[in-house]
Image (tube, rainbow, N blue to C red):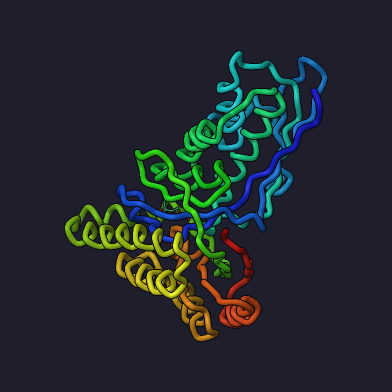
């Protein structure tokens, strides 16, 4: 079999993080500036599969890796999906420049790159939906109760309007959006933020359901604004979504500082993106503004900025 490589992008959520877990719609887009990449090369027959992840100094034979390891789970699920399940002897190497636990979908991108590459290596066509489903099974190991938005946007590799238990809808973008992504540098595992919010929601469901409903409405309205290219409306909705995320207790001083710095530097709108408590925020900028907003974010403490264009 021939050496095979494939990649998958990072992602950011534009609207609807957290409320999406409770069944409301959300919007997410791929971030192609960061990627997870997988390479598979054949080994002599009978050697079995070896997984190598140099970024985390990991090398192990698949047969020795426990079932709850996400890298091994991605390989096992991918092989199981390729009927008849091939007996593989190959080295599977995965690398990624997507920061971990910052809301950029690094786990889902790594799984997607691995599953895609395995499918291509054994010449088994996996549809984007099948890919998303396999990665979702692996995501459950990372997150416990993921909504499914990360695996969907990354497996499809295009902007999505996502709602749990609904068929995926593509999000069309009426006018390109330039976003500056600012990283607080603080790792924030999604399962912790989601679990903590779940406890607060259970203690006061009426209050939290009201906030989630407002976020869902914003995501639906933002879809229309994005499709018709109305930047002022999108920016306004970003500010309102951030305020709601503050109310449900998932922002942080560092995120709020970056959001304010972006607005003061002339960004049209800004909000945290992803689980919160750390990780990334996003700022929507006008033509020629990306550099000055990125500079302001660094001055306010961002450890990394990425400029990406949607659409
Ligand atoms: O993994 P993150 O940080 O992009 O967060 C995912 C978004 C949440 O809505 C908070 C969780 C989920 O499963 O949708």
Residue nearest the viewer, comparing 287 with 35: 287
Q: Residue at x 72, y 33 (%)?
A: 92
Residue nearest the viewer, comparing 73 with 35: 35
Residue 177, percent from left and from top: 55, 66
Q: Residue at x 62, y 64 (%)?
A: 308
Q: Residue at x 57, y 60 (%)?
A: 310
Q: Residue at x 28, y 58 (%)?
A: 212
**The C terminus is located in which quarter?**
bottom right
- Does 41 sit above or below residue 148? above
**The N terminus is located in which quarter?**
top right
- Does 4 sit above or below residue 211? above
Residue nearest the viewer, comparing 243 with 173: 173
> For the view shown, which residue lies furthest in the bottom direction?
264
Residue 206, percent from left and from top: 17, 58
Residue nearest the viewer, comparing 253 with 108: 108
Residue 300, percent from left and from top: 56, 81
Q: Is residue 159 left or right of residue 223?
A: right
Q: Is residue 15 left or right of residue 56?
A: left
């Amino acid at each position: 079999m021939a050496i095979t490589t494939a990649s998958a992008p990072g992602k950011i959520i534009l609207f609807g993080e957290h409320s999406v877990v409770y069944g409301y719609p959300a919007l997410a887009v791929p971030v192609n500036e960061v990627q997870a990449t997988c390479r598979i090369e054949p080994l002599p027959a009978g050697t079995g599969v070896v997984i190598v992840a140099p970024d985390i100094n990991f090398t192990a034979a698949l047969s020795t890796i426990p079932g709850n390891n996400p890298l091994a789970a991605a390989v096992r699920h991918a092989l199981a999906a390729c009927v008849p399940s091939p007996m593989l002897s190959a080295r599977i190497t995965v690398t990624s420049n997507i920061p971990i636990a910052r809301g950029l979908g690094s786990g889902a991108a790594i799984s997607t790159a691995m599953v895609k590459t395995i499918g291509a290596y054994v010449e088994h066509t996996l549809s984007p939906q099948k890919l998303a489903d396999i990665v979702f099974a692996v995501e459950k190991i990372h997150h416990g109760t993921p909504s499914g938005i990360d695996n969907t946007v990354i497996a499809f590799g295009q902007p999505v309007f996502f709602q749990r238990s609904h068929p995926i809808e593509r999000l069309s973008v009426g006018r390109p959006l330039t976003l500056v992504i600012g990283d607080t540098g603080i790792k924030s595992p999604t399962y912790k933020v989601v679990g903590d919010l779940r406890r607060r929601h259970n203690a006061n469901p009426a209050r939290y359901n009201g906030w989630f409903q407002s976020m869902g409405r914003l995501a639906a309205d933002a879809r229309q604004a994005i499709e018709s290219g109305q930047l002022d409306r999108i920016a306004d909705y970003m500010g309102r979504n951030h305020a709601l995320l503050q109310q449900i207790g998932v922002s942080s001083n560092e995120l709020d500082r970056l959001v304010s710095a972006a607005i003061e530097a002339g960004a049209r709108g800004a909000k945290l993106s992803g689980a919160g408590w750390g990780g990334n925020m996003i700022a929507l900028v006008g033509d020629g503004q990306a550099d000055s907003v990125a500079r302001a974010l660094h001055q306010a403490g961002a450890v990394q900025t990425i400029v990406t264009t949607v659409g």
